[in-house]
Image (spheres, grey):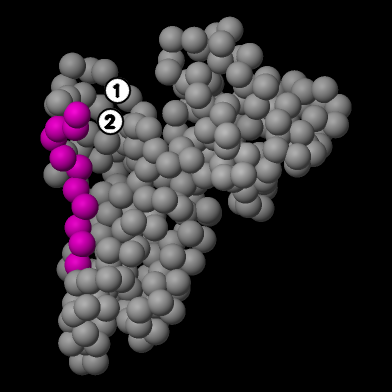
Amino acid sequence: MEIQLKLYGSSKILSEKETLDIQLPNNSDIKKLRDILTKIISEKYSRSNLENLPKTAAFFSEKDEVIDDSYKLSNKEYISIIPPIGGG
Amino acid sequence: MTLHTALVKIEEEKISSEKAKKFIASEKNGAESIFVGKVRNENDGKKVIAVTYDAHDQAVIKSFQLICNNAKNKFDKNAKIFLEHAKGYAPVGEISILIAVGSGHRDEAFKICRYILEEVKHQSPIWKKEHYVDGKEEWLPGHSLRPKKEVK
């Protein structure tokens, strides 16, 4: 299955587009998504200081609510990655 | 209306302290507290020329309203609150955040202002990328919103 990950903050380094399409095995959860992001970053973005991102990021559902590691993703689901924040 | 919150596309519009003062003005106010955060020209020994603010718009507005309502419930239910934050490319000197509070008494006005600032930094999904004199740029570290029970 495939999900669309909307990128914010430092995660924008992962694509020139606003979103990143990610292939996942069926019935994947957020924990699996973190594992796949770790792999993508170590293979393609090892010099970008993003190595902690999969561990420190939160994820928002389409309803803008934080979803935890056990949340089951659906095919074509649109979620947001929320790197550590720091406005003001 | 006692509450105004907004994200301001800073390349199109400025954050205005005059607008904030007008919004909170009331004869019931014994105190008005205004905090203005600005983009400064140095951070961690590096010369900064600008900051780009990225934001998850809908979640930011939700968080602003929640934070301000919590502040009113905690300190002064009748307070008038104005909160705006910049989004986009903001050069040095630009206002990044403006919090204005009108309240019956000084203590509540100060406390609400401080409370909102700290909560925005810890709850509102906003990110900063600094641009330096030498042409380099860097996303700044921040506060993780990942559920605490998951972080070991």
Disc with the residue nearer the chain's start (2 vs 1):
2
**Tag count:** 2
The quarter of the picture where the C terminus of chain B appears is top right
Determine the residue positioned at 75% across, 41% down.
Answer: A71
Left or right of A15 in this view: B134: left
Numbered disc 2: secondary structure = strand
| Residue hosting label 2 | B130
Return the residue at label 1: B137
Q: Position of residue A78 (x, y in %)?
A: 69, 38
Residue at 27 percent across and 78 percent down: it is B108
- Residue A19: quadrant of the picture: top right
Left or right relative to B81: residue A55: right
Q: Whole-Å distance between the Cαs marked 2 and 1?
A: 5 Å
Q: Is residue B111 magenta?
A: no
Which residues fall within the magenta stretch? B34-44
Residue B29, percent across and down?
22, 87
SS assignment for the magenta stretch, majority: strand
The chain to which mark 1 is attached is B
Amino acid identity at mark 1: Glu
Q: Secondary structure at mark 1?
A: strand
**Residue at the far top in the pictured view:** A43
| In the depicted structure, whether residue B116 falls above or below residue A39 | below
Q: Quadrant of the N terminus of chain B?
A: bottom left
